[in-house]
Image: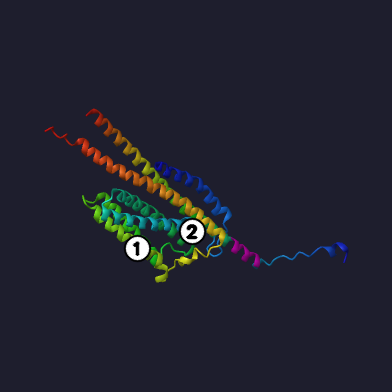
Amino acid sequence: MSKYVPYVLLAGAAALFPYCVQRVFLHTPIEAEMGTAQKIFYFHVPLAWICMLFAVVCGIAAGIQLSKRSERAEAVAVAAGEMTVLAGLGVLITGPIWGDATWGTPWTGDARQVSTALLWLVFVAYLLVRRYGPSNSERIAAALAIFGAIDVPIIYYAVKIWKTTHPQTGVVGSLPDSMWNTLWVCLLALMMLSVAFVWIRAGQERTASALDRAWIAAESPLPKPA
Amino acid sequence: MNPIEAETKKVEGRDPATVRLKREYEAEVENKVASDYSHIVWAYGIIWALFAIYGVILWRRSVAQRADLDALTAKLAGK
């Protein structure tokens, strides 16, 4: 039954995305100060939340993998790590595009931008070590993922601790209902898509491990009868 | 004044300086909206392209795993 869950989520996301676009462009008012470019917000912010969520998931799963040597946790960590890199790349590209339209410059080097870029680089390093590292590098990779997850609260509080060009975290809560509802619909669509991809990827990782073990067993010589 | 003149209002044209200023504002807004739309198209396009590419990678990986499983099954059957 659970094998159908990601496909149900994918179907839900596919149905929801056209509605998101319709809501964003036809039913949500244009923000007074930033103008039409503010509509990038409805996908940029959910992507940032998804990036941070899966960074934390990856860190926790990596911690479980380190302490219990759980294969399931390892698969979840790898899948969540890939999603962190994917969503992070989306954030790091759409953010400067939005910045170019509203601030007049794509990169101001503020604390939130830099800490998000660092998070992305740490998880890229995690995936590279995981894929190309020597045997037993899983433990180093897991430590990297935990280190990366610690960056998430730094990103969140960056706008409170340092002076940044990014708006404060409370700005989302102060949105009018029309913008707030659109944001949630877009978040739901992107979250369904992300969870589906992470689910499928984690399944593939476990299948790959099972296949490796089966190949080793199939190619090893049969024990001679005593 | 005849009754028709009394019911109508004299048309007063805008002075050319005000008209030019209004046109400049309109052109500025037009450029801003065009630039905003260009930014939005790039941002949305890149997001969807990233997810679509990742989806294709997952699908290809799934196909490769199925082929690997078939090869293993064939090997075990022939053993």
Percent x, y for residue B56? 39, 43
Q: Amino acid at mark 1?
A: Asp
Q: In the displayed structure, does residue A137 sit left or right of residue A61?
A: left
Q: Amino acid at mark 2?
A: Phe
The answer to which of marks 1 and 2 sits earlier in the sequence is 2
Question: Measuring 28% from the left and 50% from the top, which residue is drawn there?
Answer: A70
Callout 1 crowding tier (Cα within 10 Å): few <14, some 14–19, many ≥20: some
Q: Which residues are magenta?
A: B18-26
Reply yes or no: does residue A136 show up in magenta.
Answer: no
User: Which disc, if any, is residue A151?
Assistant: 1
Question: Where in the figure is residue A143, as x and y percent of width and height?
Answer: 27, 58
Along the line of sight, which residue is nearer the eye, B52 or A205? A205
Q: Locate residue B5, reporting x and y percent.
A: 84, 63
Q: Label for residue A41?
A: 2
Check disc 2 and report its element: helix, strand or loop: helix
Is disc 1 placed on a helix, strand or loop?
helix
Question: Which mark's residue is nearer the viewer, 1 or 2?
Answer: 1
